[in-house]
Image (spheres, helix red, strand yellow):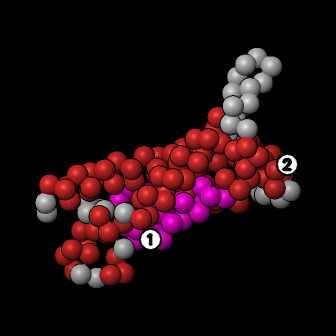
C-alpha cells in the first residue's frame, strides 16, 4: 500500500465514521424519544406509526450505521445511509432557497438545511471513493479474497 493509499484510506475512515455517527444520533433518538417521531411522522408525512414501528426503524438504522463504521457490504450500507439522508433532504427543500433567513430574534432558521446539503455531498464522495476505502472490512476482504461482492 502506497503512502497515497494510506492517506485515502485514513480520509475515508474518518468520513465513514463521521457520517455513520451523524445518522446514528438521529437513529438513537428514535429509540430514546419515539413519541417525538410519531408526532413528526403524523404532522409532516401524514402517517400514523406505532411505537414498535419507530423502534424498529431506529434499530435498523443503528444496525446499518454499525455496518458503515465497519465497512461491511459497503455499497448497500453506505447507499442505505445516503438514501435515508436524501429522504430528509426531500422533506426540507424549501430552506435551500433562503439559506440566510433569520427569525425575529435574529436566529438563522434554515442553517440545518444548508448543513444537510454538505452531509449529502459527503455521502456522495464516500460512495464515489469506495474503491479507495482500504481500511474497512469490505476493503480488507476484497484484497484478501478478491471477491467483488464484499464491496
51 displayed left or right of 148: right
Q: Report the residue at 44% width, 71% height from top.
A: 75
- What's drawn in magenta, residue-wise? 64-87
The residue tagged 2 is 43
Q: Is residue 51 visible?
A: no
Of 67 and 22, nearer the camera is 22
Q: Is residue 71 visible?
A: yes
- Label 1 Cα crowd, 10 Å radius (few <14 / some 14-19 / many 20+): some
Q: Residue furthest top?
A: 105
- Label 2 Cα crowd, 10 Å radius (few <14 / some 14-19 / many 20+): few
The residue tagged 1 is 75
Residue 81 image position (x, y, % from top left): 53, 60
Q: For residue 143, which quarter of the picture?
A: bottom left
Q: Which quadrant would the N terminus be assigned to in this image?
A: bottom left
Question: Which circle's residue, 2 or 1, is located before the other in the chain?
Answer: 2
Q: Report the residue at 55% width, 53% height from top.
A: 120
Amino acid at each position: 500500500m502506497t503512502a497515497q493509499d494510506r492517506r485515502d484510506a485514513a480520509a475515508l475512515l474518518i468520513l465513514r465514521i463521521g457520517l455513520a455517527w451523524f445518522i446514528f444520533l438521529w437513529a438513537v433518538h428514535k429509540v430514546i424519544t419515539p413519541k417525538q417521531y410519531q408526532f413528526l411522522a403524523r404532522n409532516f408525512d401524514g402517517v400514523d406509526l406505532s411505537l414498535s414501528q419507530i423502534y424498529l426503524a431506529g434499530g435498523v438504522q443503528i444496525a446499518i450505521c454499525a455496518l458503515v463504521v465497519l465497512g461491511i457490504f459497503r455499497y448497500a450500507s453506505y447507499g442505505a445511509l445516503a438514501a435515508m439522508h436524501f429522504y430528509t433532504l426531500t422533506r426540507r427543500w424549501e430552506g435551500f432557497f433562503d439559506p440566510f433567513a433569520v427569525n425575529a430574534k435574529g436566529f438563522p432558521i434554515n442553517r440545518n438545511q444548508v448543513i444537510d446539503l454538505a452531509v449529502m455531498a459527503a455521502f456522495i464522495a464516500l460512495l464515489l471513493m469506495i474503491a479507495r476505502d482500504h481500511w474497512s472490512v469490505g476493503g480488507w476482504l476484497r484484497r484478501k479474497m478478491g471477491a467483488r461482492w464484499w464491496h
